Image: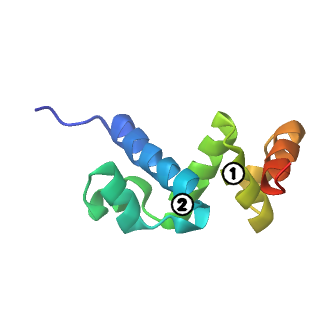
Amino acid sequence: MSRMKPMERREQILAAAIVIATRDGFNALTRDGVAEQAKVATGMVNHVFSTMDKLRKAVMKAAVHREIKSIIATGLAEGSIEAHEAPDWLKRAALDTLMGK
């Protein structure tokens, strides 16, 4: 079995984090939970993202890129710069989702 390339590993971990943030909420992200979801060691999450802040920012950027409104709404509520950089129409749609509209 060959080693996974760094960008593939990053995407694997980021995808796992997005699953958790979508399923359980953005604030449910933990290093251990992401590692378990990605089926990697916790140290690998640390190696790829070095800090939880960097992982959270990557998740928020990915949520904006993929238009995941539930994650963006949480980011807007918490003052995330990445969420606030979303297009206005997406921010409105995310907040509408949060308000149940």
Residues 2 and 72: in front is 72
Can the viewer see residue 67 in this picture?
yes
- Disc 2 to disc 1: CB gap under 8 Å: no
Residue 3 falls left or right of residue 71: left
Q: Which residue is mark 2?
A: 24
Kindly state the secondary structure of the residue where label 2 is placed: helix
User: How far across and how far down the image is residue 61, in percent?
Assistant: 64, 45
Q: Which quadrant of the structure image shows residue 10?
A: top left
Residue 70 falls left or right of residue 79: left
User: How far across and how far down the image is residue 50, in percent?
Assistant: 42, 62
For image coordinates 69% across by 51% down, the residue present is 70
- Looking at this view, name the residue that lies furthest to the left: 1
Q: Quadrant of the N terminus?
A: top left
Kindly state the secondary structure of the residue where label 1 is placed: helix
Crowding at label 1, few (<14), some or many (≥20) Cα neighbours within 10 Å? many
Amino acid type, mark 1:
Ser
Q: Which residue is mark 1?
A: 70
In the rendered view, would you say 81 is above or below 63? below
Tell me the number on the disc at residue 4: none
Amino acid type, mark 2:
Asp
User: How far across and how far down the image is residue 5, in percent?
Assistant: 29, 34
For image coordinates 79% across by 58% down, the residue present is 76
Q: How many numbered circles does the render carry? A: 2
Can the viewer see residue 47 in this picture?
no
Residues 93 and 4: in front is 93
For image coordinates 30% across by 63% down, the residue present is 42
- Looking at this view, name the residue that lies furthest to the front: 100
User: How far across and how far down the image is residue 96, in percent?
Assistant: 85, 49
Q: State how far apart marks 2 and 1 are (Cα).
A: 10 Å
- Ranked by sequence position, the earlier of labels 2 and 1 is 2
Colour pattern: rainbow
Crowding at label 2, few (<14), some or many (≥20) Cα neighbours within 10 Å? few
